[in-house]
Amino acid sequence: MSDSQNDTVTDPNGTPPEREPTRKQPRIIACNQKARQLASMVLARRGAARALTQDPPPTQYPYGCTTVFAPGWEVDSSNGTHGLCQPIERDLYDCYHTCYWPAQVPDGVTNSPSWTSSCGAPMQDWKSIDLVFP
Amino acid sequence: MQPLVPTYQSLLSLFAAALLAFTLPAQHGEGATGTTPPPAGHPPIEGAVATPTAPGAVAGVPATSSTQDPASKKEPEKKKKRPEKAGIPVEDLLVQSLCARCHIRDERNHMTRISYIRKSPEGWAQSIKRMGRLHGLQLTPTTAKMLVRSLSNSHGLSRSEAERGLYESERRVHWSEEHHDADFKRACAQCHPLGRALLQYRDKEEWQLLRATHVAMFPLSSRQLGGGPPRDTSSRRGGFSGSFPGASSSGNASSSPSSNRRGGGNNSTTSSNQSSRRSSGGSVGDRVLDQLSKDQPLFTPEWEAWTQNKREVPLQGKWTVHGHETGRGDIIGTLEIQRTDADEYALTWNLNWSDGSSAVRTGKGVLYAGYSWRGRTQGKDDVNWREVLLLDDQWQQFKGRVFTGNYDEIGFDVTLDRDLGRTRIVTLGNASLPVPCTDHELDVYGEGFDADVKVSDFFIGKGLTVTGAERKTDRHVVLRVSAAPGTKLGTRTLAYGPRPGSATITLYDTVDYVRVRPLQGLSRNGGAKHPRQLERFEAIAVHRGKDGKPYTKDDVDLFQVRGKWALAEFAVRDEDDDLQYVGTIDATTGVFTPNVDGPNPKRKWQGNNVGDVFVTFETSLDIPVRPPEKKKTDDDKDDDEGDAENKDGDKVAAEAPEQAPKVAARETKKFLARSHLLVTVPIYVRWQVLDWEDR
């Protein structure tokens, strides 16, 4: 789903980064709208965007699961909600198909193979997603 | 992406089928070995033929198959003689007949799987529902109910065993598992409470099969538990390479190739490239299962003692109920239990809250395995309340939780004391007394108070005087108590007649601060499609305790206070806007109602109405002024040392009795307190338990 026009541009405004990345300092590429928005926000402040896995980590916690790894269901790794996948409907079927949260989301492997049949697009039609009582 | 889904699912199904092929032979014993072929069209599963366990082999240890060992061909009779495992016979014809389709019964009435597991009623209900969901077991509600009861009695838990994970049965929202082993939490608690595992007792092979079943049904759980097919082959079959919730690259939660056969126990056939990934003590799953096998075996002294003395416990009669509900205050009342059948009872609750409300509720209950009470009642509000209670060893007291709510979040803790037919004190109300005070009204609840109850019947200790006694009913007396200036602070027990009593009174000099309970709240969006999970808060006045320092562990809760509730932003990022989306709190009652579920178009990225906020509380209290601290002189220090043996650590009011005023000066003081509230997303699957009883 990467944007071919911008997939090599770090700064969405077209401004070249202050320092050219080297092999030891890999560059993070903003490949969708959300990531570009995040990058522009960070660049405005620091001049370079960093991923959470880089050391040292950024002091500001980003929002959404694009840049947060393995959030919890109720809480994220900081015991808050800002690292959760948001909105949850956007990521719900991925949790379902991969059986990622079997205690919180019906699993498509064993117990609820047809859970998604009532709703094909959860972001638009989230009210038709069934609550399951196994 | 949609066309890929069936393909992906089919890969997952193949993965699950392969795991089941690893598992089922062991589940069904030798008689079933080889009776579970791979699904039609499925390629031969490598290792499935060689997997059947040798006689007496522990799950996870590869057996020597007949095709590999020529000697076994010559001695087929020996292979059939599998050493008999110790198990619990299934004597109930209902279980024998309904479960015999899959679970083989031998001449000892041992049935595969069933005879080697003990569980709570909820655990058996889950298993039976799974049999219906996945294996075509069809039961009427009545039959299912009888099945759960039979298995819970014959293959249930003793009292102490049921108590370990009672919070799971009680469906508590607020509990802590911090004290448990880190591996145990990593293996199990990332998906469900540890209580679910604590309420199961199995033999060693069954613990291994528990993992096999988990990995077969939920393949990614191998990241936590280990187990499953070897990594290299599973990846060719569409295995998983992503990370699992909470698994870190540095942790041992990742699937260990050392545990890839039949339930995933350690085995000696691990290839060299796999063994290089082994940690020194095996995988997390291996260690956890080994420990569970030791801590929660099939047979325990407690269980064997209970089975030897098993009988129907007589519960009929009246019980005194006392407890506390968040926000509504203390509870006092009675429960009438009427026996209707073996282990079945009809109930009538009469409850009164300290906020002035009351309720009469009727329903029925069942006592499982001699100790575990499960009941449900209805009242005028037409709302079902459930009860999960545990009987004590002496059969005289129940403790547990009564609850309702969409997520079982509305509830209260209760203690029930059986009426003994003699006068006694059970509990007290309004039991925090300021020092000094005059004619403080102390509620005394119990049974059998005489009509001519006298002041002299009560003894309350040095410095306190009972100045009046008024009998409200034979279960309620109001005492007027005065505390002399300089009375030693701390706790007292109220004695009645010849009995010492155990109900305690707390003496304090002033209120040091106010705290909010719970300190960490949890709520879930709902109202549009999903039900809401509410959260309730209450504020408690606190005394600084024996050490004289506030905010320490020995601080003493005094009484609930009323005031004004509000929400405030818990800022964790720039332009944090949670406050305007998460929901509202009732300024008077402290009940938080979350906002609706679903994406919010008005919010950035259409985020849900989730967030974390502060819950703030503000009140003004008219409290006694603490007398100035007396400066210690050398003589005082000597006195302190001389008194050390006689003191239990309680602080003494600073002024000597003869110097202190008889009535304490008072002041109006403003108190602020706050706690944290997390408002998060709904749960889309509800693993309801014991709903058979509702049908």
Image: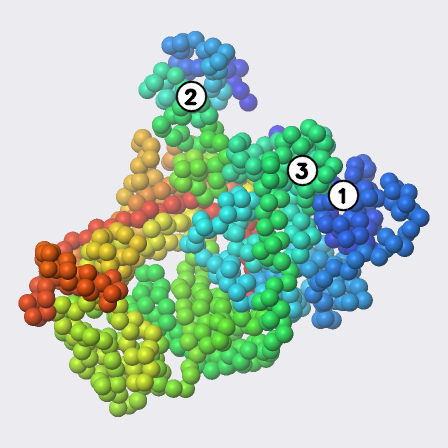
Q: Nearer the viewer, mark 2 or mark 3?
A: 3
Q: What is the secondary structure assignment of the residue under circle 3?
A: helix
One can see residue B273 in this view: yes
Residue B41 higher or lower than B141, as above or below: above
Colouring rule applied to residues: rainbow
Residue type indicated by callout 1: Pro
Residue type indicated by callout 3: Ser
- Label 2 marks which chain's residue? A
Q: Which residue is mark 3?
A: B258
- Label 3 marks which chain's residue? B
Residue type indicated by callout 2: Arg
> In this rendering, do the residues under marks 2 and 3 share a single chain?
no
Residue B478 located left or right of residue A20? left
Residue B566 located left or right of residue B206? left
Q: Residue at x 50, y 63 (%)?
A: B163
- Which of the two discs, 3 and 1, labels the residue nearer the N terminus? 1
- Label 1 marks which chain's residue? B
Answer few, some or many: residues within 10 Å of disc 2's Cα (few below 14, many 20 plus, some between 14 and 19).
some
Q: Which residue is mark 1?
A: B62
Q: Residue at x 72, y 32 (%)?
A: B271
Rendered-image quadrant of the C terminus of chain B: bottom right
Q: Residue at x 34, y 60 (%)?
A: B326
Q: Which residue is mark 2?
A: A50
